[in-house]
Image (cartoon, rainbow, N blue to C red):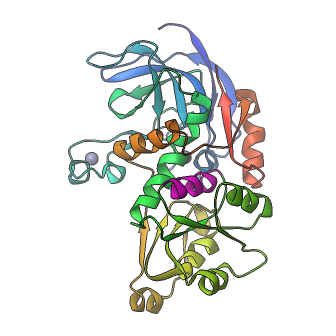
Amino acid sequence: MQGKMKAAIQRKTGTPLKIETLPIPQPGPGDILIKVTACGVCHSDLHAIDGDWNPGPVLPLIPGHEVAGHVAAIGAGVKGFRLGDAVGVPWMYSACGQCEFCQAGMETICKAAEATGYSKPGGYAEFMLADAAFVARLPKKADLYAIAPILCAGVTTYRGLKRTKVRPGQWMAVVGIGGLGHIAVQYAIAMGMRVAAVDVDDEKLKLAKKLGAEFTVNARKADPVAAIQEKLGGTHGAVVTAVATQAFEQAIGMLRPAGTVAYIGLPGGKADQIRASISAITNWELTVTGSNVGTRLDLNEAVAFALNGLVKAKIQKAPLSQINRIMNDMRKGRIVGRMVLDLA
Ligand SMILES: [Zn+2]
Ligand SMILES: [Zn+2]
Protein backbone atom coordinates (compact mmCIF):
# COMPACT_ATOMS: atom_id res chain seq x y z
CA MET A 1 0.00 0.00 0.00
CA GLN A 2 1.38 3.41 -1.00
CA GLY A 3 0.70 6.72 0.66
CA LYS A 4 1.29 8.66 3.84
CA MET A 5 0.25 8.24 7.45
CA LYS A 6 0.21 10.27 10.64
CA ALA A 7 2.32 9.03 13.53
CA ALA A 8 3.53 10.27 16.92
CA ILE A 9 7.29 10.00 16.76
CA GLN A 10 10.26 10.78 18.99
CA ARG A 11 13.66 11.42 17.39
CA LYS A 12 15.55 12.16 20.64
CA THR A 13 14.99 10.50 24.04
CA GLY A 14 13.42 12.79 26.63
CA THR A 15 11.74 15.11 24.11
CA PRO A 16 7.94 15.23 23.62
CA LEU A 17 6.37 13.21 20.83
CA LYS A 18 5.69 15.04 17.57
CA ILE A 19 2.92 14.25 15.13
CA GLU A 20 4.53 13.80 11.72
CA THR A 21 3.42 12.66 8.29
CA LEU A 22 5.45 9.63 7.24
CA PRO A 23 5.39 7.09 4.40
CA ILE A 24 3.26 4.01 5.09
CA PRO A 25 5.73 1.14 5.80
CA GLN A 26 5.87 -1.76 3.34
CA PRO A 27 5.50 -5.34 4.63
CA GLY A 28 8.53 -7.58 4.12
CA PRO A 29 8.48 -11.40 4.19
CA GLY A 30 6.48 -12.67 7.19
CA ASP A 31 4.99 -9.24 7.92
CA ILE A 32 1.50 -7.87 7.78
CA LEU A 33 0.63 -4.21 7.46
CA ILE A 34 -2.05 -3.15 9.92
CA LYS A 35 -4.42 -0.22 9.58
CA VAL A 36 -4.61 0.80 13.24
CA THR A 37 -8.00 1.46 14.80
CA ALA A 38 -7.07 1.69 18.47
CA CYS A 39 -3.89 1.83 20.52
CA GLY A 40 -3.86 1.80 24.31
CA VAL A 41 -1.43 4.06 26.18
CA CYS A 42 0.64 1.97 28.58
CA HIS A 43 2.93 3.23 31.35
CA SER A 44 5.79 1.49 29.52
CA ASP A 45 5.38 3.99 26.68
CA LEU A 46 6.16 6.74 29.16
CA HIS A 47 9.30 4.89 30.29
CA ALA A 48 10.28 4.52 26.63
CA ILE A 49 10.00 8.22 25.79
CA ASP A 50 11.63 9.26 29.06
CA GLY A 51 14.51 6.83 28.46
CA ASP A 52 14.09 5.15 31.87
CA TRP A 53 15.21 1.68 30.82
CA ASN A 54 18.44 0.15 29.71
CA PRO A 55 18.81 -0.56 26.82
CA GLY A 56 16.75 2.38 25.60
CA PRO A 57 14.35 2.31 22.66
CA VAL A 58 15.50 2.26 19.05
CA LEU A 59 15.21 5.80 17.64
CA PRO A 60 13.29 7.26 15.98
CA LEU A 61 10.62 5.78 18.23
CA ILE A 62 6.93 5.33 17.51
CA PRO A 63 5.53 3.97 20.81
CA GLY A 64 2.41 1.87 21.30
CA HIS A 65 2.02 -1.85 21.96
CA GLU A 66 -1.70 -2.29 22.61
CA VAL A 67 -2.67 -2.15 18.98
CA ALA A 68 -5.90 -3.35 17.42
CA GLY A 69 -6.72 -2.90 13.77
CA HIS A 70 -7.23 -4.61 10.43
CA VAL A 71 -4.88 -6.27 7.98
CA ALA A 72 -4.23 -3.79 5.15
CA ALA A 73 -1.45 -5.61 3.24
CA ILE A 74 0.21 -9.02 3.48
CA GLY A 75 3.94 -9.72 3.04
CA ALA A 76 5.49 -12.62 1.13
CA GLY A 77 5.12 -16.06 2.68
CA VAL A 78 2.37 -15.11 5.16
CA LYS A 79 -0.38 -17.71 5.32
CA GLY A 80 -3.78 -17.69 7.00
CA PHE A 81 -4.55 -13.97 6.83
CA ARG A 82 -6.91 -12.07 4.59
CA LEU A 83 -7.21 -8.36 4.00
CA GLY A 84 -9.58 -6.86 6.55
CA ASP A 85 -8.98 -9.51 9.25
CA ALA A 86 -9.06 -8.01 12.75
CA VAL A 87 -5.80 -8.47 14.65
CA GLY A 88 -4.09 -7.32 17.84
CA VAL A 89 -0.41 -6.56 18.35
CA PRO A 90 1.14 -6.98 21.82
CA TRP A 91 4.47 -5.83 23.30
CA MET A 92 6.11 -9.04 22.10
CA TYR A 93 6.74 -8.18 18.45
CA SER A 94 8.67 -11.38 17.74
CA ALA A 95 11.03 -13.95 19.27
CA CYS A 96 13.68 -16.19 17.69
CA GLY A 97 11.77 -19.46 17.97
CA GLN A 98 15.07 -21.37 18.25
CA CYS A 99 16.60 -20.76 21.68
CA GLU A 100 15.99 -22.96 24.73
CA PHE A 101 13.39 -20.51 26.10
CA CYS A 102 11.43 -20.33 22.86
CA GLN A 103 11.53 -24.12 22.65
CA ALA A 104 10.13 -24.31 26.18
CA GLY A 105 7.24 -21.96 25.41
CA MET A 106 8.92 -19.16 27.39
CA GLU A 107 9.45 -16.75 24.50
CA THR A 108 8.92 -13.86 26.93
CA ILE A 109 12.57 -14.32 27.98
CA CYS A 110 14.03 -14.93 24.50
CA LYS A 111 17.16 -12.77 24.29
CA ALA A 112 16.50 -12.07 20.61
CA ALA A 113 12.93 -10.91 21.17
CA GLU A 114 11.83 -7.63 19.60
CA ALA A 115 9.43 -5.25 21.34
CA THR A 116 6.59 -3.39 19.66
CA GLY A 117 6.82 0.36 20.12
CA TYR A 118 10.33 0.02 21.57
CA SER A 119 12.76 -1.81 19.30
CA LYS A 120 10.18 -1.81 16.46
CA PRO A 121 7.76 0.99 15.50
CA GLY A 122 4.46 0.71 17.33
CA GLY A 123 0.85 1.75 17.12
CA TYR A 124 0.84 5.50 17.80
CA ALA A 125 0.34 5.66 14.02
CA GLU A 126 -2.31 5.11 11.40
CA PHE A 127 -0.41 2.09 10.04
CA MET A 128 2.22 -0.26 11.42
CA LEU A 129 3.96 -3.50 10.54
CA ALA A 130 3.71 -6.66 12.63
CA ASP A 131 5.20 -10.16 12.51
CA ALA A 132 2.26 -12.29 11.35
CA ALA A 133 3.36 -15.17 13.63
CA PHE A 134 2.96 -13.08 16.80
CA VAL A 135 -0.32 -11.19 16.38
CA ALA A 136 -3.58 -12.14 18.08
CA ARG A 137 -6.47 -12.99 15.78
CA LEU A 138 -9.66 -11.22 16.77
CA PRO A 139 -13.24 -11.90 15.74
CA LYS A 140 -14.72 -9.59 13.10
CA LYS A 141 -17.19 -8.00 15.48
CA ALA A 142 -14.80 -7.47 18.40
CA ASP A 143 -14.77 -3.96 19.90
CA LEU A 144 -11.19 -3.00 19.03
CA TYR A 145 -11.10 -0.09 21.50
CA ALA A 146 -12.12 -2.36 24.37
CA ILE A 147 -9.70 -5.10 23.30
CA ALA A 148 -6.63 -2.83 22.89
CA PRO A 149 -5.69 -2.67 26.61
CA ILE A 150 -6.08 -6.44 26.90
CA LEU A 151 -3.12 -6.83 24.52
CA CYS A 152 -0.67 -5.54 27.13
CA ALA A 153 -2.40 -4.77 30.41
CA GLY A 154 -4.54 -7.91 30.02
CA VAL A 155 -1.95 -10.42 28.93
CA THR A 156 0.65 -9.05 31.37
CA THR A 157 -1.54 -9.24 34.44
CA TYR A 158 -2.96 -12.60 33.36
CA ARG A 159 0.49 -14.14 33.07
CA GLY A 160 1.53 -12.59 36.38
CA LEU A 161 -1.47 -14.17 38.10
CA LYS A 162 -0.72 -17.53 36.45
CA ARG A 163 2.88 -17.42 37.62
CA THR A 164 1.85 -17.18 41.28
CA LYS A 165 0.13 -20.58 40.88
CA VAL A 166 -2.65 -19.38 43.18
CA ARG A 167 -5.71 -21.63 42.93
CA PRO A 168 -9.43 -20.81 42.91
CA GLY A 169 -10.65 -19.89 46.40
CA GLN A 170 -7.25 -18.60 47.53
CA TRP A 171 -6.32 -14.98 48.23
CA MET A 172 -4.53 -12.73 45.77
CA ALA A 173 -3.20 -9.29 46.64
CA VAL A 174 -3.28 -6.89 43.70
CA VAL A 175 -0.92 -4.06 44.55
CA GLY A 176 -1.56 -0.95 42.44
CA ILE A 177 -5.00 -0.44 40.87
CA GLY A 178 -4.08 1.57 37.78
CA GLY A 179 -4.22 0.61 34.11
CA LEU A 180 -2.84 -2.86 34.86
CA GLY A 181 -4.23 -3.34 38.34
CA HIS A 182 -7.91 -2.77 37.58
CA ILE A 183 -7.61 -5.48 34.93
CA ALA A 184 -5.64 -7.79 37.25
CA VAL A 185 -8.52 -7.64 39.75
CA GLN A 186 -10.94 -8.86 37.06
CA TYR A 187 -8.71 -11.69 35.82
CA ALA A 188 -8.10 -12.83 39.40
CA ILE A 189 -11.83 -12.95 40.07
CA ALA A 190 -12.56 -14.66 36.73
CA MET A 191 -9.91 -17.23 37.72
CA GLY A 192 -11.77 -17.87 41.00
CA MET A 193 -9.40 -16.04 43.32
CA ARG A 194 -10.37 -13.80 46.24
CA VAL A 195 -8.89 -10.34 45.86
CA ALA A 196 -7.28 -7.91 48.29
CA ALA A 197 -6.60 -4.58 46.54
CA VAL A 198 -3.91 -2.13 47.63
CA ASP A 199 -3.44 1.41 46.34
CA VAL A 200 -2.80 4.92 47.65
CA ASP A 201 -5.90 6.41 46.01
CA ASP A 202 -9.42 5.88 47.40
CA GLU A 203 -10.99 6.37 43.94
CA LYS A 204 -8.96 3.49 42.56
CA LEU A 205 -9.83 1.30 45.56
CA LYS A 206 -13.50 2.08 45.02
CA LEU A 207 -13.13 0.84 41.46
CA ALA A 208 -11.42 -2.34 42.72
CA LYS A 209 -14.31 -2.95 45.09
CA LYS A 210 -16.82 -2.45 42.29
CA LEU A 211 -14.90 -5.00 40.25
CA GLY A 212 -15.16 -7.57 43.04
CA ALA A 213 -12.26 -7.03 45.43
CA GLU A 214 -13.38 -8.20 48.90
CA PHE A 215 -10.73 -6.36 50.87
CA THR A 216 -9.12 -2.99 50.15
CA VAL A 217 -6.44 -1.02 51.93
CA ASN A 218 -5.15 2.49 51.28
CA ALA A 219 -1.38 2.22 51.79
CA ARG A 220 -1.16 5.95 52.47
CA LYS A 221 -3.53 5.68 55.43
CA ALA A 222 -2.66 2.26 56.87
CA ASP A 223 0.22 -0.21 56.75
CA PRO A 224 -0.99 -2.64 54.05
CA VAL A 225 1.27 -5.46 55.29
CA ALA A 226 -0.12 -5.32 58.82
CA ALA A 227 -3.69 -4.95 57.55
CA ILE A 228 -3.47 -7.97 55.24
CA GLN A 229 -1.66 -10.14 57.80
CA GLU A 230 -4.14 -9.23 60.57
CA LYS A 231 -7.35 -9.53 58.58
CA LEU A 232 -6.51 -12.30 56.09
CA GLY A 233 -3.51 -14.06 57.60
CA GLY A 234 -1.61 -13.04 54.48
CA THR A 235 -2.41 -13.79 50.86
CA HIS A 236 -1.41 -16.89 48.89
CA GLY A 237 -0.16 -14.74 46.06
CA ALA A 238 0.46 -11.15 45.08
CA VAL A 239 0.97 -9.28 41.84
CA VAL A 240 2.59 -5.86 41.88
CA THR A 241 1.59 -3.45 39.16
CA ALA A 242 2.55 -0.30 41.06
CA VAL A 243 5.42 2.01 40.16
CA ALA A 244 6.65 2.77 43.71
CA THR A 245 9.55 0.69 45.01
CA GLN A 246 7.94 0.39 48.43
CA ALA A 247 4.98 -1.49 46.96
CA PHE A 248 7.33 -4.22 45.71
CA GLU A 249 8.91 -4.54 49.15
CA GLN A 250 5.55 -4.54 50.95
CA ALA A 251 4.09 -7.20 48.65
CA ILE A 252 6.57 -9.77 49.99
CA GLY A 253 5.33 -9.01 53.49
CA MET A 254 1.70 -9.49 52.45
CA LEU A 255 2.26 -13.17 51.61
CA ARG A 256 1.37 -16.08 53.83
CA PRO A 257 3.94 -18.86 54.21
CA ALA A 258 4.74 -20.54 50.86
CA GLY A 259 3.23 -17.58 49.02
CA THR A 260 4.45 -16.25 45.69
CA VAL A 261 4.65 -12.67 44.52
CA ALA A 262 4.95 -11.89 40.81
CA TYR A 263 6.48 -8.54 39.88
CA ILE A 264 4.85 -6.99 36.84
CA GLY A 265 5.42 -3.24 37.16
CA LEU A 266 8.75 -1.63 36.29
CA PRO A 267 9.58 1.49 38.30
CA GLY A 268 12.84 2.00 36.37
CA GLY A 269 15.74 4.34 37.09
CA LYS A 270 16.69 4.89 40.74
CA ALA A 271 13.51 3.13 41.88
CA ASP A 272 14.76 -0.19 40.46
CA GLN A 273 16.20 -1.57 43.74
CA ILE A 274 14.35 -3.24 46.61
CA ARG A 275 15.22 -4.21 50.17
CA ALA A 276 13.81 -7.53 51.28
CA SER A 277 14.10 -9.68 54.40
CA ILE A 278 16.21 -12.74 53.63
CA SER A 279 15.01 -14.51 56.77
CA ALA A 280 11.35 -13.94 55.85
CA ILE A 281 11.91 -15.42 52.40
CA THR A 282 13.95 -18.34 53.76
CA ASN A 283 11.92 -19.21 56.84
CA TRP A 284 8.52 -18.87 55.20
CA GLU A 285 9.62 -20.39 51.88
CA LEU A 286 8.39 -17.42 49.87
CA THR A 287 8.85 -17.06 46.12
CA VAL A 288 9.59 -13.78 44.37
CA THR A 289 9.23 -14.11 40.62
CA GLY A 290 9.10 -11.80 37.64
CA SER A 291 6.53 -11.88 34.88
CA ASN A 292 7.42 -10.27 31.59
CA VAL A 293 4.36 -9.52 29.41
CA GLY A 294 3.11 -12.83 27.99
CA THR A 295 3.62 -15.61 25.48
CA ARG A 296 1.38 -16.17 22.47
CA LEU A 297 -0.55 -18.73 24.51
CA ASP A 298 -1.04 -16.23 27.34
CA LEU A 299 -2.13 -13.67 24.76
CA ASN A 300 -4.77 -15.92 23.24
CA GLU A 301 -6.05 -17.02 26.65
CA ALA A 302 -6.16 -13.44 27.95
CA VAL A 303 -8.03 -12.25 24.85
CA ALA A 304 -10.54 -15.11 25.23
CA PHE A 305 -11.44 -13.93 28.76
CA ALA A 306 -12.16 -10.46 27.35
CA LEU A 307 -14.11 -11.72 24.36
CA ASN A 308 -16.23 -13.78 26.74
CA GLY A 309 -17.05 -10.66 28.74
CA LEU A 310 -15.20 -11.73 31.89
CA VAL A 311 -12.70 -8.88 31.77
CA LYS A 312 -13.32 -5.34 30.61
CA ALA A 313 -10.84 -2.48 30.57
CA LYS A 314 -12.17 0.86 31.71
CA ILE A 315 -11.23 2.99 28.73
CA GLN A 316 -11.30 6.59 27.64
CA LYS A 317 -10.78 7.41 23.96
CA ALA A 318 -8.57 10.29 22.81
CA PRO A 319 -7.20 11.51 19.49
CA LEU A 320 -3.49 11.06 18.66
CA SER A 321 -3.03 14.85 18.90
CA GLN A 322 -3.62 14.58 22.70
CA ILE A 323 -0.73 12.21 23.31
CA ASN A 324 1.62 14.59 25.15
CA ARG A 325 -1.17 15.71 27.47
CA ILE A 326 -1.96 12.05 28.21
CA MET A 327 1.73 11.39 28.96
CA ASN A 328 1.77 14.29 31.42
CA ASP A 329 -1.37 13.05 33.16
CA MET A 330 0.25 9.63 33.39
CA ARG A 331 3.41 11.08 34.92
CA LYS A 332 1.23 12.60 37.63
CA GLY A 333 -0.71 9.35 38.19
CA ARG A 334 -3.90 11.14 37.16
CA ILE A 335 -5.33 8.49 34.84
CA VAL A 336 -8.04 6.13 36.06
CA GLY A 337 -8.29 3.04 33.84
CA ARG A 338 -6.79 3.14 30.36
CA MET A 339 -6.45 5.83 27.70
CA VAL A 340 -6.95 4.47 24.17
CA LEU A 341 -5.90 6.43 21.10
CA ASP A 342 -8.53 6.52 18.36
CA LEU A 343 -6.74 6.27 15.02
CA ALA A 344 -9.68 5.27 12.84
ZN1 LIG B 1 2.42 -2.21 28.16
ZN1 LIG C 1 14.26 -17.35 21.40
Q: Residue at x 67, y 78 (%)?
A: 224
What is the quadrant of residue 26 in the picture?
top left
The answer to whether residue 257 is above or below residue 57 is below
Mark yes or no: residue 91 visible.
no
Q: Position of residue 267 (x, y in %)?
A: 59, 62
Q: Residue at x 56, y 45 (%)?
A: 311
- The verdict on residue 333 being magenta is no
Q: Residue at x 75, y 55 (%)?
A: 333
Mark yes or no: residue 107 visible.
yes
The answer to whether residue 237 is above or below residue 114 is below
- Viewer-nearest residue: 230 or 130: 230
Q: Position of residue 199 (x, y in %)?
A: 70, 66
Q: Position of residue 126 (x, y in %)?
A: 59, 21
**Left or right: 195 as drawn, with respect to 73:** right
Q: Residue at x 46, y 25 (%)?
A: 139
- The verdict on residue 183 being magenta is yes
The answer to whether residue 150 is above or below residue 227 is above
Q: Quadrant of the C terminus?
A: top right
Q: Position of residue 65 (x, y in %)?
A: 53, 38
- The residue segment tinted magenta is 179-190
